[in-house]
Image (cartoon, rainbow, N blue to C red):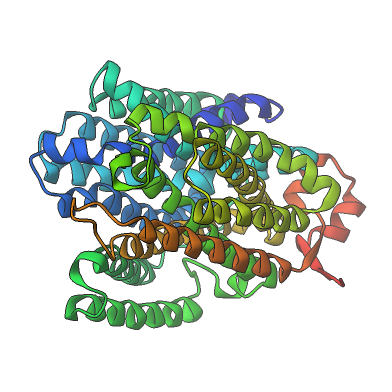
Amino acid sequence: MSSSTGTRSRYHVTFVVLAVATGAYSLLQSLVSPVLPLLETSLHTNQNTVTWVLTAYLLSASVFTPILGRIGDMVGKEKVLVAVLIALTLGTVLAAVATSISVMIIARVIQGVGGGVIPLAFGIVRDEFPREKVAGAVGVIAALLAVGGGLGLVLAGPIVNGLDYHWLFWIPAVVVAAAAVATYFFVPESPVRTPGTISWLAAVLLSGWLVSLLVAVSQAPSWGWFSTSVIGLLVAAVVLAVAWVMVEIRSAQPLIDMRMMRIPAVWTTNLVALLFGVGLYSVFAFIPEFLQTPSSAGYGFTASITESGLIVLPMSVTMFAFGAASGRLSARFGARAVLIAGSVISVPSFAIMTFAHSLIWQVVLAMLLLGAGFGLAFSAMSNIIVDAVPSHQTGVASGMNANIRTIGGSLGAAVMASIVTSGALPSGLPKESGYTAGFGMLAVAMVFSALAAVLIPRLRVQRDAHQVEQAGMSHPELALVAAGTVVGDESE
C-alpha cells in the first residue's frame, strides 16, 4: 500500500486524487434532482415516494459522515477512504441497475456512505500538506463539494437526453472506482491517529435523532406540520438528541468531543454551515423546478431540463472560481473576513429571486452572485474548522460541519417545499407567491448567516506536533508548540 512505498512529498498527486473523489461524490448529491419526475414514471411510483431518492441519501450521509470521520482518525484516513469509495461505487452501480423504487432507495442509502469522503479528505490535507498549502487545498476541495452539486443540475439534462437516466449513475461509478484505486496506490497513510474505540451507543443515538428529525421535516409538507406523526418524530428527535449528548459527555471515547464543539470558533462556524445548507439545498431542489414551470402559469420560463441547467451554470462557474481563490484570500484577510463576505454577497442573490425573477438575465445575475458567495463561504468555513481544532480532531470536526450543512439542507428543503406548495393554481402548479415567499425566507437565512459569521472569533493558530514535523522545524521549536493548535482568540 502507499503508506509503505509512497513518499509524503507527492502531495500534488494526493490532491488530485482527493479532488476527483470529492467531485464525483458531490455530483451524486444533485444529479438526480432535475429528473425526479422521470424517475417517478420509470420506476412506477408516486411523487411522495420518489422524493425518498433524495431524502434517503441525505439521511444516510448525515449518519455516516461523522462516524466515518471518527473511524478515520482512529484507524487511518487512507484505509477508511478506500473503503468509503468502494461502498460508494457499489451503491452507485446498484442505482444504475435498479428497476424498482425500493432498490433505488436502498442504493441511495449505500451511496450516503460516501459522505465520509468529506472529513477524510480534509483530514488527509491537514496531515500531508505543507502548512502554507493547507488553506488553498481545503478551499478548492470545499469549493468542489458545492460546485459538483451545481454541475449535477447542469449535466443531468444532456446525459438523460443523450443516453438515459441509468447513466446518471454509471458515469460517476466509473470515476469513483478509479478514485478508489488511485487512493490505494498514491495516497499515503496518515501517521496521525487517535487511539480508542467507537461508542456504538452514541452512534445509534446519533442515527436515531438525525433520522427522526430529517424524516419529520422532509415529510411534514405531505403529512402536515401538526400531524401526530410529525410531532411524535420531533419529540423523539429531541429526546434522543439529549440522550446522545449525555452519553457523549460521559464517554471516555466520544464519537464527537463535546468540549471541542464548545470552542467558539467551532459552534459559530457550524451555525453558519446550518444556514448555508438551508440555502444551497433549496437552490438545488427548487431553482430547476421554478425555471421549468410553464410560462402559462404566469411565471417560469418553460425551460427543459438541459435549459434550466444552463441557466444555473453561472452559479457553478463562480462558485468554483471564488472557492479556489478563497484560500489565498483567507491567507491575506483571514478566513473569518472571507466567510462574512461570502454571507453578505449571498443576500442580494436571493433578494433578486424574491423581487425580480421575470427575466432570464435577472436569474443569471442571481446565480452569479450566489455562486460567488457560496464559493467563498464554503471554503472559508472549512479553513476555520481545520485551524480551530488539533489535527487529531480534524476528521470529526470537518465531518460535523459538513453534516450540519446536510441537516440544514434537509430542513431548508422541507420548509421551502411547505412554503412553495402552500397555494396551488387550478393547473396544480404552485402559485408564484409561494416561490416569492420561499426565496424571501432564504434571503433572511443568509442575513442571519452573516450575523452568525460576525460572532466567529479571530483565531491565532500555531502548529501542532505533526505539522511541525511536516514543516521541518527544530526540536526546540517543536517543544514550544506541540501542546496544541489553537492558542486562543485574538481580541477584536
Taking 359 as reference, is 267 left or right? right
Q: How many discs appear? A: 0
- Image position, residue 139 (x, y; %): 66, 42
Q: Residue placed farthest to the left in the image?
A: 44
Q: Residue placed farthest to the top in the image?
A: 162
Which residue is painted at 50% across and 80% down in the image?
249
**Is residue 173 shown to the viewer in this render?**
no
Tell me if residue 218 comes above or below residue 147 in the rendering: below
Q: Looking at the rendering, which quadrant does residue 300 occupy?
A: top left
Which residue is painted at 56% across and 51% down in the image?
352
Tell me if residue 215 comes above or below residue 92 in the rendering: below
**Is residue 330 shown to the viewer in this render?**
yes
- Image position, residue 189 (x, y; %): 56, 37
Tell me if residue 378 comes above or below residue 445 in the rendering: above
Q: Looking at the rendering, which quadrant does residue 343 occupy?
A: bottom right
- Image position, residue 129 (x, y; %): 71, 37
Tell me if residue 41 comes above or below residue 120 in the rendering: above
Of the 4 image quadrants, the one containing the C terminus is: bottom right
Taking 36 as reference, is 323 left or right? right
- Image position, residue 342 (x, y; %): 67, 52
Taking 35 as reference, is 152 left or right? right
Taking 457 as reference, is 250 left or right? left
Given residues 71 and 338, the one toward you in this image is 338
Which residue is painted at 87% across and 72% down in the image?
491
Given residues 361 and 240, the one toward you in this image is 361
Which residue is painted at 50% across and 62% down in the image?
440
Q: Looking at the rendering, which quadrant does residue 447 occupy?
A: bottom right
Given residues 341 and 362, the one toward you in this image is 362
Given residues 330 and 20, the one toward you in this image is 330
